[in-house]
Image (tube, rainbow, N blue to C red):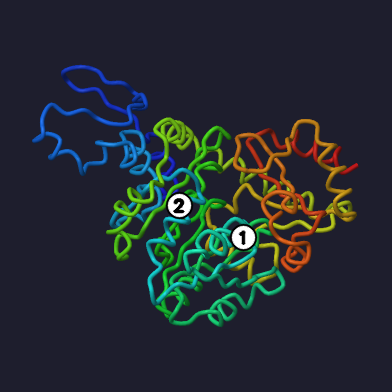
Amino acid sequence: MTERARRATRAARAGLGRGSASGGADLVAAPSLSVVRTYADLDTLDADIESRRSYRRYGDASTVQLEAALADLETPDGAEAAIARVTGSGQAALGLAITLVASAKRRRVVVVRPCYSGTDALVAGPLGNLGVQLTTVDLTPERGADQVALVSSALDDDVCAVVTEVITNPLMTLVDVPAIAGAAHNAGAACIVDSTFTTPFLFQPFAHGVDIVFHSLTKHLAGHSDVLGGVLLVQPGHEAAGWLDGFARLVGASLSAFDAWLALRGLRTAALRIERGSANAEALVTWLSADPRVRAVHYPGLHGDAEQRLAASLLRHGRGPMFSLELDGGLDAADRFVRGLAHVRLAPSLGDVATTVSHPALTSHRSLSRQQRDALGVGDGLVRVSAGIEALDDLRGEFDLALR
């Protein structure tokens, strides 16, 4: 059995109960909705107060089950289990990560872009008010071969972390994560990776030297557009692993019990959804790349021979359900395309069971000026696609009609 197959099996069984010889058990445990536990006396209170179950901000049965499942999926075979905490959102997970690694002498964060614009906005804004400094490094498709040199040039002994995605949002440039992690470590900084686009089913950052991983659970892992959540995972050998639980309790970056329960339910089908969405995306990219009505298609491995080789090395299980297409005519062309989609929906998110499209300039990257977006290659004619599990012929027919 392959490592990928084992992860799919573990995900499908995540959180399921098992009967005993003396009786049955609920196959799926109900969420515990009580915020706090009650105790009969001071001795039992004292014995339990530091546990994950005494107060909802510390955790509950549903969040602990979800954390255990996600840590299992992100931990390479044979390695010590990662330390995980689920949070109220992916942004909360990133904010928690920065608090873990920032110090008085290391207060600068290097963010690799393009990325979700909330990443650099969080560092420059709320965290900037606390003295954290932001440096951005732009890896446009044309500059992909210079990734390590560009990141290394921004590093010094005041950097606490390099934050990068595996597949950049929204241009789908593939980042050489092992090399970036090595550059960060050479400077004494942590490497923090947003693995939302890849999930543990396509790429495991801890196997490539990464220190800290976070996901927006809202996207592919929960997968049904009914959960808002995030997860932060720390490599057990990193010093921040020992601080994660205490820091999470203090800053209150908690996921609700019901969202944790829903995310655990979604996680059980995530491997199948990612596999089908990846296959649909690959087929659509092949077809659209040859269509003269489309100016350009962005997808991991399409940005030159070097990236193609990198994709073959890092993304051996598929390149994910995400791609972007670029249309001549700017905002008007993008609007006509979106209006022409009969059933594929426009939504400012991704990772749903069904295919959705988004317009980065108006959603994920609207906080940037036009000049900043243009410098990154995020034009008004760019449409990001999150491929779902529908029949490929239906998707191709609908895209064809919208392009007319």
Is 189 rendered above or below residue 67? below
Residue 227: x and y in percent read 52, 35
Give the vertical position of 124 relative to 335 (above or below): below
Residue positioned 57% across, 64% down in the render: 124
The residue where tag 2 is placed is 93
Residue 109 x %, y %? 50, 70
Nearer-the-camera pick, 81 or 93: 93
Disc assigned to residue 115: 1
Give the vertical position of 335 relative to 326 (above or below).
above
Return the residue found at the far front: 129
Residue type at the position of mark 2? Ala
Which SS class for mark 1?
Answer: loop
Q: Position of residue 151 (x, y in %)?
A: 56, 76
Number of numbered discs on residues: 2
Of callouts 1 and 2, the N-terminal one: 2
Tell me which residue sits at (60%, 54%) in the image: 319
The residue depicted at 35 percent of the width and 47 percent of the height is 72
Q: Residue at x 58, y 68 (%)?
A: 112
